[in-house]
Amino acid sequence: MPTFSTSDGVRLHYEEHGEGPPVVFLAGWAMDGSWWRHQLRLSSDFRMVIVDPRAQGQSEKVTRGLRLARGAKDLHELLQMLDVDDVCLVAWSRSASMALAYWELFGPDRISRLVFIGITPCMSTRSDWSWGW
């Protein structure tokens, strides 16, 4: 079971399957990488990396660094360690917000495609967005 230690000393669990262009999957809040088990059939064509964000799944349970920006930094450090570029990043729920934080902090470094599942661009209702809370 591979783990990676972040620059602030938190062990993150990740899995790798297959070879080819990299696709990284991030689970939603309070979920783990097992949610992506049905996508494993893609590993015949892609290098799949499935990540449990900090405090989730098999990653270390911590109460620090649970901010979106720290999650983005965790992801950036993992991608650097794995030495992957041209990544298709698939993010579900809260992890989609983390992916947006990644883009804000690091731009397109190592990421070529973003796929967001189950996230709204704005959580609250306002004059130009009536679909929030």
Image (spheres, grey):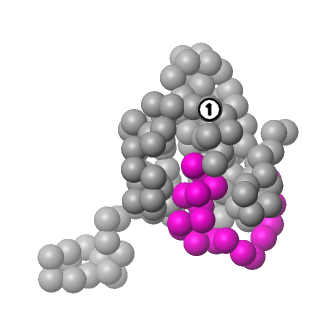
Question: Residue 53: in sight, yes or no?
Answer: yes
Relative image position of residue 18 (x, y in whole percent)? 65, 21
Which stretch is magenta?
Answer: 58-76
Asked whether residue 59 is drawn in magenta, I would say: yes
Relative image position of residue 128 (x, y in whole percent)? 15, 76
Q: Is residue 60 above or below residue 127?
A: above
Tell me which corner region of the image, top left, top right, bottom left or bottom right, holds residue 114.
top left
Tell me which corner region of the image, top left, top right, bottom left or bottom right, holds residue 100.
bottom left
Q: Give me the residue at 45% from left, 52% from top.
A: 106
Q: Give me the residue at 66% from left, 34% from top.
A: 82
Residue type, mark 1 in image: Asp
Question: Looking at the image, which is closer to me, 24 or 74?
Answer: 74
If the image is split into quadrants, where does the N terminus sit?
A: top right
Question: Residue 93: in sight, yes or no?
Answer: no
Task: List the residue tagged with mark 1.
Answer: 83
Q: Is residue 14 above or below residue 124?
A: above
If the image is split into quadrants, where does the C terminus sit?
A: bottom left
Element class at badge 1 = loop
Left or right: 37 as drawn, with respect to 85: right
Left or right: 48 as drawn, with respect to 95: right
Q: Give me the residue at 72% from left, 75% from top.
A: 64
Relative image position of residue 20 (x, y in whole percent)? 55, 18
Relative image position of residue 76 (x, y in whole percent)? 57, 49
